[in-house]
Amino acid sequence: MNEDRLVRSTNWGHVAFATFLLVLCLGYLWESASKSTDTENLLLVLPATGLAALLYLILLFQELRARRSADEAMEAPAPFTWSKLKTPAIMFLFGLYMLGLTYAGFDIPTFLFIAGALAVQGERRPLIVFGYPAVFTVIVVWGMQKLLPFPIPTLLL
């Protein structure tokens, strides 16, 4: 059987993503150090970059030594499904929500984000898609208006 035979197999996607993150950390450290080498300015950036470098080396070592079964190493990538787009769609909606908060206040973007997120997650009943966000938005805006000592920007409420 092929299942018992182990072969070396490196997941280069993991290595590439970890390299990208390490380069971002090093770039941020470089930028911070070029502005000021004062200890107070590098107090969080330098240890965080060091930790990122350590984790990168551990991941690289593990990936280069990884042994997987021959079947797993030769396995074809999973076929595309629309469900894989749910997370990026929610992230995009959240970005629009953050943008909307600056231009339309708190109420309309909150309603639209929740309704959109419910639709992306597969909810199709109109009462749930539009009713729940409306009730939630009214309760949250009312609560924030009562609890916060400063006014929150809203468009309708």
Image: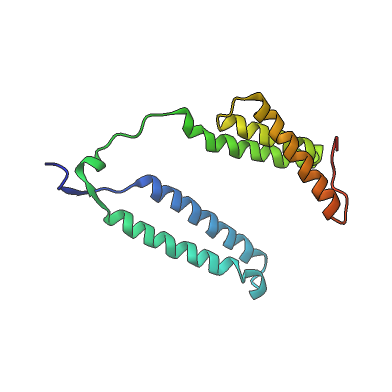
Identity of the residue drawn at 21% across and 46% down: 69
Q: Residue at x 49, y 66 (%)?
A: 51
**Which quadrant is the C terminus positioned in?**
top right
Locate residue 31: give its quadrant.
Answer: bottom right
Return the x and y of residue 26 as percentages of the image width and height.
53, 59
- Residue sitting at the far left: 1
Residue 43, x across and y down, in percent: 62, 71
* Residue at 44%, 53% in the rendered image: 18
Type of colouring: rainbow
Q: Is residue 6 left or right of residue 128?
A: left
Coordinates of residue 47 in the picture (x, y in percent): 54, 69
The answer to which of 136 and 154 lies nearer the viewer is 136
Left or right of 118, for residue 16: left
In this rendering, the count of numbered labels is 0
| Nearer to the camera, 80 or 57 | 80
- Above or below: residue 55 compared with residue 82: below
Up-down relation of residue 43 to residue 110 (above or below): below
**Viewer-proximal residue among 22 and 14:** 14
Residue 135, x across and y down, in percent: 74, 37
- Which quadrant of the figure has residue 156? top right
